[in-house]
Image (cartoon, helix red, strand yellow):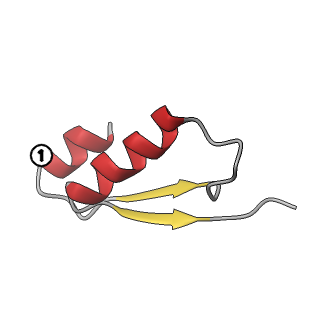
Amino acid sequence: MVKASVSMGHKTYVYARPFTTQSSPAKIGIHKEFQAMGVTIVQVSID
């Protein structure tokens, strides 16, 4: 959905939990990919 939104020229935001020492390399990779595409990532903490 994120890639489709970007490809259609929409300003795209993703809400995500912050990285931790437990974050998987896959999660970090997806975030980096999205950032490279121009997606704004908003990291929110759920306490």
* Position of residue 39 measured from the top left corner of the image (x, y, whole percent): 30, 60
**In the picture shown, does residue 34 fall above or below 4?**
below
Farthest residue, direction right: 47
Q: What residue did someone put label 1 on?
A: 7
Q: Residue 12 falls in which quadrant of the image?
A: bottom left
Determine the residue positioned at 66% across, 65% down.
Answer: 44
Residue at disc 1, secondary structure: helix
* Position of residue 29 measured from the top left corner of the image (x, y, whole percent): 39, 41
Is residue 39 shown left or right of residue 19?
A: left
Is residue 7 shown left or right of residue 38?
A: left
**In the picture shown, does residue 35 fall above or below 24?**
below
Q: Which residue type carries mark 1?
A: Ser
Count of numbered circles in the view:
1
* Position of residue 17 measured from the top left corner of the image (x, y, whole percent): 64, 54
Task: Point out the image quarter for the C terminus.
Answer: bottom right
Determine the residue positioned at 41% across, 50% down.
Answer: 31
Q: Residue 40 falls in which quadrant of the image?
A: bottom left
Task: Point out the image quarter for the N terminus.
Answer: top left
* Position of residue 24 measured from the top left corner of the image (x, y, whole percent): 58, 35
- Tell me if mark 1 has few (under 14), some (14-19) or many (20+) residues whose alpha carbon lies within 10 angstroms of its own: few
Farthest residue, direction front: 21
Determine the residue positioned at 51% across, 66% down.
Answer: 42
